[in-house]
Image: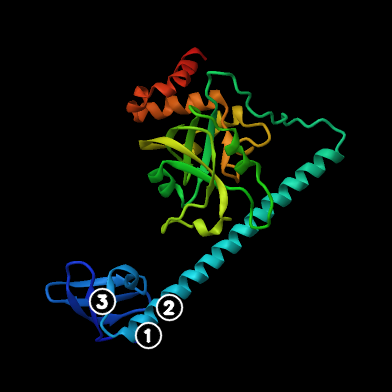
Amino acid sequence: MIDLLQKRVRHTGILGTGTIIAQEERYITVEFENKTSKFSYPMAFEKFLVLEDSNLQEQVVNKIKLAKEAEAAKKAEKATKRDEEEQKRMEELKSKSQSSKKQSIEKVYVPASRVPGQALIYLVFRGDTYNEEMQGQFIWAPKYSKAGGTMHHWDRLMDIQEGDVIFHSSDGYIKAVSRAKGPCQESARPDLSTGNWDQWEKTGRRVDCDYHTLHLPLKHGDYKEEILKYCNVKYAPFDKDGNGNMGYLFDLNPDLASFFIKEIAKKNPEMLDLEFLWFLLVRQQTR
């Protein structure tokens, strides 16, 4: 650990200049003229603090750089392993299907047919990139995995057209519903300072969306019985236990989408004002 006790620092905001009076493994405490504040170490030196000793400042900046590179490498390794496991699983499923002479009780996956003038419905699962995509009003997926393979749940972006409805799930909750502003476009990986974008390959596809965030998100795990009525097909967004499947973008059964909208509207009545969702509300009423 770089010894910073009693070193002078300048706050980039309004606190002025102060002295580091305590140092722990992950935190430092700085005494300013009018306030004593605790900061995360070393990340505070990326945005908020500057050491008066330029040599020490350079050492700390290098420490931050090395830490971020190590974290990025760790995440990239994790993403590659996940992609390889997904590809292996898909190959095993394909092999089983080809070798078995028995007809599977699982229904065959058939991509949703597009009828002119009617929207298709999708469900997208996000991890720690949800906030960035929501704020930027888009969804994005790479073309290829780190291993060079393609994924059906990434390629599905190519099916989206203007007016299609997308349900956005993150951390087990449906947090937003959006309308696609147009078809997907070739797009480089988002160049954002937040989120773990560097775990993906740089070439990808993007769909711009008109997000409508839910004031009270819907926990889809509370509706597994209803989910299982509609997700007994291959490549469904939920597995045989009603949990979200590993992947990004999936077709969403219209009846399940209609059910979700009904439940969402109970606590988010403003969703009833969105004309692009009315066809789902009508569907629910006629079931």
Look at discs 3 and 2 and give the one toward the viewer: 2
**Among the two numbered marks 3 and 2 on one chain, the one whose residue lies closer to the N terminus:** 3
The answer to which of 106 and 40 lies nearer the viewer is 40
Residue 105: % across, % down: 75, 30
Give the residue number, with chain letter if any, for mark 3. Answer: 29
Give the residue number, with chain letter if any, for mark 2. Answer: 63
Instruction: Residue lying at the far left in this picture: please name it.
Output: 34
Look at discs 1 and 3 and give the one toward the viewer: 1
Disc 2 residue type?
Lys
- Quadrant holding the N terminus: bottom left
* Secondary element at image label 3: strand
Q: Is residue 281 left or right of residue 147?
A: left
Distance from the alpha carbon under mark 2 to that under mark 1? 9 Å
Which residue is painted at 62% across and 35% down in the image?
236
Disc 1 residue type?
Ile
Q: Is residue 213 left or right of residue 76?
A: left
Numbered badge on residue 2: 1
Please tell me how crowded label 3 is: few (under 14), some (14-19), or many (20+) other residues with Cα within 10 Å. Answer: some
